[in-house]
Amino acid sequence: MADDTKLTRTKQLWAQSGKFLTGHTSRPETERLPPGQHLVNNWPVLDLGQTPNVPRERWRLDVGGVVDNPFSWDWATFAAQPQVEKTTDIHCVTTWSRYDNLWEGISTHHLIEMAQPRPEATFVLFTSNDGYTTNMALSDFASPDAMLVHSWQGEPLTLEHGGPVRVVVPHLYFWKSAKWIRRIDFASEDQLGFWEVRGYHNHADPWLEERYS
Ligand SMILES: Nc1nc2c(c(=O)[nH]1)N[C@H]1C(S)=C(S)[C@@H](COP(=O)(O)O)O[C@H]1N2
Ligand SMILES: [Mo]
């Protein structure tokens, strides 16, 4: 189609992902806790038990797959991208939720605009420095609240929570938010990640209790 320019494609993606924003912001405070969840004030640590210690000086992020502009960022290049701050809630499938987490980093909108995914790119696979993987639809990754973060509550993200840089996709259960992110691949086909092949739900919407498949 003549109007299938890169700009049109990107705009369509934003329009698709706008539905998440609408659902989120219109929810009243009394309905803030998803079904089956309880509120915590601490921030539990959950992972496979392998904490990869990659300092900022040696950190790299590779972005590739079916994109027009694959790239590899070091820390300085990542830090030079437009920075945003957002406050969002965490919902873990193990039933704890934590409100009002202040994140600082880059929006996934910006990363997607830099990478220029091709029209056939409809899925994203995340690979982390501990070998962990997780997957989602590109429309979920493009949610307006989704970020790659380096700071939490104004302090550098600690190693145990995925520092130097982790993914945060707050409208999905937290296992979809990869700690210690190493690479992001855009793909035309869905590839299940670590927990998704072990029976966790492929989509993971806490409001629909999409815990296990
Ligand atoms: N790289 C990596 N990312 C990961 C995990 C992991 O084991 N490795 N665990 C996931 C799970 S199951 C959860 S609940 C959250 C926990 O993040 P937190 O330890 O910062 O609370 O990280 C997710 N991201
Ligand atoms: Mo989890």
Image (spheres, rainbow, N blue to C red):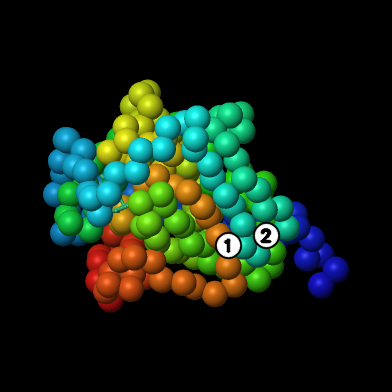
Whichever of labels 2 and 1 marks the residue nearer the N terminus, that label is 2
Residue 170 place in picture, x, y as percent:
37, 49
Does the Cβ of the disc 1 residue fall within 8 Å of ligand 1?
no
Task: Say left or right for 35 vs 133.
Answer: left
Does the Cβ of the disc 2 residue fall within 8 Å of ligand 1?
no
Q: Secondary structure at mark 2?
A: loop
Q: Nearer the viewer, residue 86 or 61?
A: 61
Q: Nearer the viewer, residue 185 or 154?
A: 185
Q: Relative to 78, does residue 120 appear above or below in the rendering?
A: below
The residue at the point 47 percent across, 42 percent down is: 148
Q: Is residue 86 visible?
A: no
Q: Nearer the viewer, residue 99 or 192?
A: 192
CA distance separating discs 2 and 1: 7 Å
Residue 95 place in picture, x, y as percent:
17, 55
Residue at the outermost top position: 154
The residue at the point 54 percent across, 33 percent down is: 75
Task: Tell me, for residue 156, which label it has, or none.
Answer: none
Residue at the outermost right position: 2
The residue at the point 29 percent across, 44 percent down is: 51
The image quarter in which residue 110 lies: top right
Residue 60 place in picture, x, y as percent:
53, 41
Q: Is residue 141 visible?
A: yes
User: Label 2: which residue?
Assistant: 67
In the picture, the quarter occupied by the C terminus is bottom left
User: Label 1: which residue?
Assistant: 186
> Crowding near pointer 1: few (<14 within 10 Å), some, many (20+)?
many
Task: Say left or right for 151 vs 61.
Answer: left
Q: Amino acid at mark 2?
A: Val
Q: Secondary structure at mark 1?
A: strand
The residue at the point 49 percent across, 35 percent down is: 58
Q: Amino acid at mark 1?
A: Phe
Asked if the residue under mark 1 is in contact with the one under mark 2, i.e. CB atoms within 8 Å, the reply is: yes
